[in-house]
Amino acid sequence: MISAALAVLENEEQRNEFAEFYERYKARFYNIALKILDNPEDAEDAVQEAFLEIANKPDTFFSLSDKKRFHYFCAVIRNVAIDMLNKNKRIQTEELSDDVIYRNNDNPLENALFDNISHNEILLFIEHLPDLQREVLILVCLLELPISKASEALRVSENVVYQRLYLAKKAIRHFIDERNENDDGKCI
Amino acid sequence: MVLRKIMVILFSTIVLCTSLMATTSAETMYLNADEGIAPAYEIASDPKSIIKIIDNCAYCTSETRGADAVSINVEQTLEKYSGWFWIWNSVDGAHWIKSINANTISVVNTKNGLSSGTYRLKSVFTLTNTKGKTETITIYSSEVKVS
Amino acid sequence: MMTENVFKSILEEYAEREWAKYADVPEHVFSRKHNRSMKRIFSLYEKNTRKFKNYYAPAPTPTIKFTRKNIMLIILIAFLAVLAGCSATYFISQSFRGEVYSDNTELFFINTENCPTTIEKKYYLPNIPEEYEVLDKTSSPFYEFISYIDNKTGKTISFSQYVKDEFTSFHLNTEKGKLVELDKNEHNGIFLDLSSEVINSNCFIWDNGDYILEIGSNLSKEELLNLAKSAEFY
């Protein structure tokens, strides 16, 4: 009786912030899942699964700002949907071996590299990166999540995260080097 | 929010207390001398259940009158608190019964060698009036602690 | 000149453009099953983030907004509190404290200091009518009882003596009986009348300073009080 009365008395300021986040973006999350799974029921389940994952381990989500939460969740829902698709299609993903090169090559993209490249050029290049590498860039570089948290969100091992990050940065570096060589008039 | 929760808990407690204060009128009635709740009596006027403990010896007194009672039966049981929730256990060798064919009765019994704990006296009065109607009342004395 | 922060902003711009593609699509109506599951998930989130909220957020200052809802709630609580309080009324006389309920009055003894803790003086009624014989006697260090019976009529008189203490209480049937406070000699007493058309039934309880004395009888009120006046000790 008391708990019922308490529930009635809850005002708007105390409303579950998680529920509000869901209400605000549920349509978009559903559509992200639907694009991958191509099945409305599965897409609903994917949304549910993603929120449940966050609810069970909320520390990362809780520590992010509002805007970052959205990006974070998009990565989560996308990977939940891909997992479901893989399960449905019975596709097995292989675990990569622990190659030292991926973990040690932690050099940031030096500021000087970007001197001769325009904003739009980088944006365009990033859009053409493989999805998996883009996702890791967003989680690690934009949201500044530790590798462990990124691996949780992407449902892959830390090795895979390191590898994807390495490959993404390598690709960007390669692109920048090529652009710089071209500007210098050298052969591509 | 905290203030609201306190108000709601207070509200619920008051509603619960007021509902518990409602009287009943069953044939078998229960009364604790520590509580102020007693149902209506049809025959009995002022039943009493009194316990006194001195030097680990309990003196158990039960008394009642009935306006038009022709016989009264009293069953006394000395009880000890088990320590668990509301459970009271009967004390061995501390159960007595007395009957009288009159409208007044008094019983005093003793029990020696009590161990430490909390005790109370349960008195069950069964009164029969001139019309043959029977009424049973159970009364508990105050609780007494033996250290 | 581009810095790493700018690189971040590019990433952010990309992300926003990427997810914006999913914004302008027909809204989906989620199933009831999904909605039910989501409610459970929200509760789970709340439960699991309670510890974080205690750490990150300062304790909110309790404030009360005087909205219509809150004012009505306060009035209701106040009303119920008064109602609960009114269920038991109280009286205090010279010698007793009573809690009056709808069907009974619980009588407590007051002025229990400096009173004997055992029966040191036994009281008796010297003026019992001749037709009455002793019916029963019981006693303990704290209690004396004697009852008399008129074998022809079945009427009885009982006389009890109690040691005064704050824990003993009497429950008087005041649903059917009438409770009256009387003064006997210099002492204050309670008279309970449960008489019917058919039979007298009453009792008188009084504090003589050291003990509580009670007479219960099938006598008339006048006879009973006369008996009480005559109480002496051995």
Image: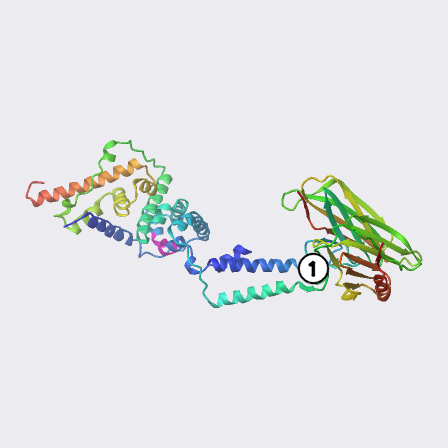
Residue range in magenta is A22-28
Colour basis: rainbow
The three-letter code of the residue at mark 1 reads: Thr
Residue C12 left/right relative to A111: right
Q: Residue at x 83, y 47 (%)?
A: B98
Query: Would residue B139 be seen by someone viewing this image from the given angle?
Result: yes
User: Farthest left residue?
Assistant: A185
Q: Residue C186 location, x and y as percent?
A: 78, 65
Residue A22 left/right relative to B141: left
Query: Would residue B67 be seen by someone viewing this image from the given angle?
Result: no
Q: Residue at x 16, y 43 (%)?
A: A175
Q: Residue C87 location, x and y as percent?
A: 65, 63
* Count of numbered circles in the view: 1
Q: Is A27 contained in the magenta span?
A: yes
Dot 1 crowding, Cα within 10 Å, few <14, some 14–19, many 20+: some
Q: Which quadrant would the C terminus of chain C be assigned to in this image?
A: bottom right
Q: Is residue C226 above or below residue C151?
A: below
Q: Which residue is tagged 1? A: B23
Picture quadrant of residue A2: bottom right
Pointer 1 indicates a residue of which chain? Answer: B
Q: Residue B85 location, x and y as percent?
A: 63, 45
Comparing C194 with B119, the one in front is: B119
Q: Residue at x 30, y 42 (%)?
A: A146
Q: Residue at x 41, y 48 (%)?
A: C49
Q: Is residue A126 above or below residue C215?
A: above
Picture quadrant of residue B41: bottom right
Q: Is B130 contained in the magenta span?
A: no
Considering the whole magenta stretch, tell me its main secondary structure: helix
Comparing A158 with C192, the one in front is: C192
Comparing C96 with C117, the one in front is: C117
Q: Secondary structure at mark 1?
A: loop
Q: Residue A58 location, x and y as percent?
A: 38, 46
